[in-house]
Image (cartoon, rainbow, N blue to C red):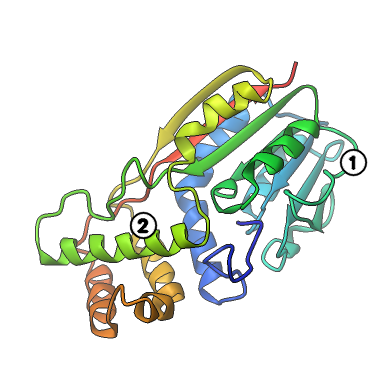
Amino acid sequence: MAEDETEHGYLLDNQQSEAGIRFGALSELFDPVTFRHVDQLGITAGMRCWEVGAGAPSVPLGLAERVGPAGAVIATDIDVSWAQDAAGGVIEVLRHDVAADPPPPGGFDLVHARLVLVHVADRAEALRRMVQALRPGGRLLLEDADPGLQPLLCPDESGPEQRLANRLRSGFRSLMAARGADLAYGRTLPRLLREAGLEDVRADAYFPITSPACGVLEAATVRQIRGRLVAAGLATDEEIDRHLANVAAGGLDLATAPMISAWGRRP
């Protein structure tokens, strides 16, 4: 679910086994939100869709159900190892860098990216290329996190377990920022879509609290970045073990950063 996974890019390497667990949790948390917007935008049979930074297959598969056999879904990412299983029928999976490679040809009725651009170094160029790929009347739907708006893993910081969780989440944000992630990017999406020339721009935001998938996502994320947290002096192994045990016990009310969804139409 990201377009740059170099040492200076995406922190959460898709090659790690935890990536599949994270993708599953993200799909459970956010697919209903994504497809509510997709359906409101009128994506139906025969349309062409470009899924940018596809990561896992759930969104391409959902788009394929909506466009049917007369439509097309192009799913792209720098690392397509998790999305490759979706290839076939109307779905084509391509290795692609949204900020460096030309858009797939043909023009699209929908271009969608979820939790992608916040990690891309040249976000402005990536956005320009996605707008360029829209057909007249086509819709761009961008969904990205804004950890700056709600930075806490446990908004109800009621005890030492919650304080530890929030300190580790702060360390995670520090690692992301050091790699160029814009932790306030989500809130800028409506303005950026208007500045890109899109019309009928709208936006909303969603973040879950106390979902089982939040615990699954948190445990997989911490395991994935554990070595980097310790190496940077942001946590000790003992603190990480304690936090993972707290998450597994199920007594923490875990949240995510708000995911801001913004959409607009090309004239």
Which quadrant of the rendered structure holds the C terminus? top right
Q: Nearer the viewer, residue 163 or 49?
A: 163
Q: Which residue appears farthest toward the bottom when viewing the image?
A: 238
- Mark 1: which amino acid? Pro
Q: Closer to the observer: label 2 or label 1?
A: 1
- Where on the picture, by quarter, is residue 57? bottom right
Mark 2–mark 1 contact, CB under 8 Å? no
The location of residue 232, given as percent across then percent down, is: 37, 76
Q: Residue at x 65, y 48 (%)?
A: 122
Q: Nearer the viewer, residue 49 or 95?
A: 95
Q: Residue at x 64, y 48 (%)?
A: 59
Q: Residue at x 65, y 39 (%)?
A: 124
Pointer 2 or 1: first along the chain:
1
Q: Is residue 206 above or below residue 12?
A: above
Circle 2 residue: 214
Left or right, 153 with reference to 41? left
The location of residue 191, given as percent across then percent down, is: 54, 25
Residue at mark 2 to residue at mark 1: CA–CA distance: 37 Å
Q: Nearer the viewer, residue 100 or 72?
A: 100
The location of residue 5, given as percent across then percent down, is: 63, 66
Q: Residue 207, can we see it?
A: yes
Q: Residue 41, can we see it?
A: no
The circle on residue 37 is none
Q: Is residue 104 above or below residue 202?
A: below
Circle 1 residue: 105
- Where on the picture, by quarter, is residue 50? top right
The location of residue 257, given as percent across then percent down, is: 38, 47
